[in-house]
Amino acid sequence: MTDSVENWESIIHKTVRAKDGHLIGSVDAVDDTAVLISTEGARTHYRIPKHIVESFDGHEVILNAPSIKLERFKGGSAEGFSEIR
């Protein structure tokens, strides 16, 4: 687990960018191991392990992987969301 984010709850509803600068979406929720992200319009959902989060500057979450590498974290519209709030 990373210490790049002191308060994981603080990143909910913040925008997320990949290492290559591409906008991924926004954080919907967090759990013990992952950050749940959806794209604008909630068309695509990602369950990104917390170790992929590189930094949070108070406004934007930056991942330590390029957008092309995030495909493997895609899930269905409800995947990973049922157990979160």
Image (tube, grey):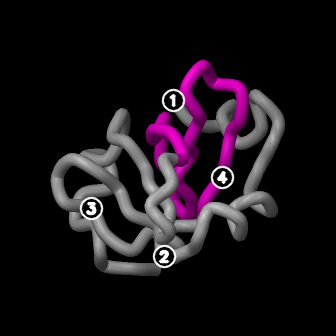
> Within 10 Å of the Cα at label 4, are there few (<14), some (14-19), or many (20+) other Cα atoms?
many
Q: Are marks 3 and 4 in contact (CB under 8 Å)?
A: no
The residue labelled by disc 1 is: 85
Q: Are marks 2 and 3 in contact (CB under 8 Å)?
A: no
Q: Is residue 3 above or below residue 66?
A: below
Q: Residue at x 36, y 39 (%)?
A: 12
Main SS, magenta region, reads strand
Q: Amino acid at mark 2?
A: Asn
Among numbered discs 3 and 4, the one appearing first in the sequence: 4
Residue 9 on image: x %, y %: 31, 46
The residue labelled by disc 2 is: 64
Residue 66 on image: x %, y %: 59, 70
Point out the stretch of residues depicted in magenta: 24-48
- Eye-nearest disc, 4 or 1: 4
Residue 17 on image: x %, y %: 44, 55
Question: How far, Cα to Cα, is label 3 from label 1?
Answer: 22 Å
Q: Amino acid at mark 3?
A: Phe
The residue labelled by disc 3 is: 56
Residue 27 in the magenta stretch? The answer is yes
Q: Is residue 77 above or below residue 50?
A: above
Q: Are marks 2 and 4 in contact (CB under 8 Å)?
A: no
Q: Residue at x 56, y 74 (%)?
A: 65
Q: Residue at x 46, y 80 (%)?
A: 1
Residue 30 in the magenta stretch? The answer is yes
